[in-house]
Every structure is written in structure tokens, then in C-alpha cells.
Amino acid sequence: GQSLEQPSEVTAVEGAIVQINCTYQTSGFYGLSWYQQHDGGAPTFLSYNALDGLEETGRFSSFLSRSDSYGYLLLQELQMKDSASYFCAGLTGANNLFFGTGTRLTVIP
Amino acid sequence: NAGVTQTPKFRVLKTGQSMTLLCAQDMNHEYMYWYRQDPGMGLRLIHYSVGEGTTAKGEVPDGYNVSRLKKQNFLLGLESAAPSQTSVYFCASGTAGGQETQYFGPGTRLLVL
């Protein structure tokens, strides 16, 4: 079967750095995507790691370690607008995404 | 470009009624998907399509049917709605070879009484 585990909630201070972890168990794993979803909104794509290592996109970075079945999303210089839910999703052998249950990030002043 | 659009935005059904949710995309994407999202849950794949005229089952297909008669449209049908199908339904599209990046519609909120 497929499973991706993330913390359910994280709280961080504006301007700080926060890391959201994701551990996975999937068959035919191709890579790990991250999506952001604001309350009442649609998920939007943030990043994708096909290979081990760090991918950086502005204030957001994502990391993957295939040997540890582990990845994380790093958000720097947190802003209030970053308060949202963040989902990791594994790209599987069926060329579909299997989503984790999401981490709700609350940024406080 | 409108991207991915979904109709209706909100619907209330009685148990046993049927309805069709429409998804349309104007990005010429080959792949289209239907997900459901329940409170505190991630997105679960219902059905997907890798091209016009093709459909396949996802993780939670029971109680739903789909059709992709045109490349730009993907329809999700509920033949006999049940309260367990109360959820938010998202449609998404993506390119072949780029399945890690999906573009989502705004969602349809469905309440089954």
C-alpha cells in the first residue's frame, strides 16, 4: 500500500524558518511533490524532487532522501500569508500522486 | 486562460439522487483527475484519465463513474448519492510526463442529506 505521514499541525513565528517533514511508504516511488492549500482554496503546486537533495524555489526549499524514505519542505522568512495546509504527495508507478493528510501551518506575529 | 474550471461550485442532494460534476481545462493537458477531500484529510484519487476516451480507477472509485469524451472535459457522475459522498471534489489536469505537477480547479462542495 501507499502511505505518507506528516505532522498534523505546526506553528511558527513570522520571519522564522519552519520545516515540515514527510515520511513515506510507497511502491514504485518516482519522486515527492509538495502542494499548498489555503482554507477554502485549491491545492497549488510548490515543488518536486525526483532526485536526492535540495531543490530551492525562492523562500521555499524541498529535500528528498530516498534511502531514508523521507523528505521535507523548508519555508524561510515566514509571512502571515504562508498560513495554509501543506501536502506532500508521492508520484507512484501508476503515474499518479498519492497525497499525505497534510500539515496545517499557522504563522503567528 | 481560465485554467481548470468546475461546475457547480456547490450542490445539495438528497440520498439516492444523481448528479454530474463537470470539469473543463483549456491548457490542452492530456491527463485529468478527480479527487475528493474530506475534513482533515488529504486528497484521495477517485478516477483519472490519461487521454480522450480513456478512464481508469483510482484509490476510491466505488459509487462514481467518469467519462472523457473530449480532451478538455472530464465528467464525474454519482448515480445514487449517499451521505458518505459528502465532500469537496477537486478536478485537476496535467501533462503526460509531468504528472508531479497538477493544476487544480476551485472545487465543488457537495452535501448529501
Image: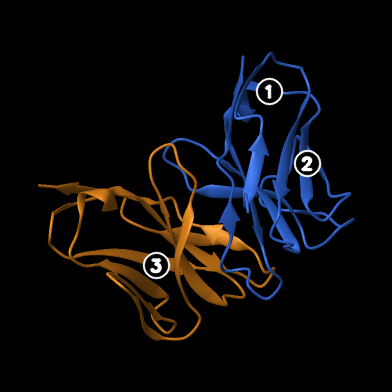
Chain colours: A orange, B blue
Give the number of the mark in front: 2 or 3: 2
Q: Which residue is mark 1?
A: B82
Q: Look at label 3 and name its amino acid.
A: Thr
Give the chain letter at badge 1: B
Q: Answer with left or right where residue B76 lies relative to residue A53.
A: right
Tell me residue B16's x, y (percent): 76, 17
Distance between the alpha carbons at the discs numbered 2 and 3: 33 Å
Q: How many residues crowd mark 1 within 10 Å: few (<14), some (14–19), many (20+)?
A: some
Badge 2 element: strand
Tell me residue A82's x, y (percent): 27, 53
Based on the displayed image, in which of its 4 quarters is residue B36 positioned?
top right
Q: Observer-nearest residue: A101 or B30?
A: B30
Seen at 39% across and 79% down, the residue is A64
- Image quadrant where one finds the N terminus of chain B: bottom right
Visible in this render: residue A62?
A: yes
Badge 3 element: strand
Q: Observer-nearest residue: A21 or B31?
A: B31
Q: Which residue is mark 2?
A: B75
Badge 1 element: loop
Q: Observer-nearest residue: A52 or A1?
A: A52
Q: Look at label 2 and name its amino acid.
A: Leu
Distance between the alpha carbons at the discs numbered 1 and 3: 34 Å
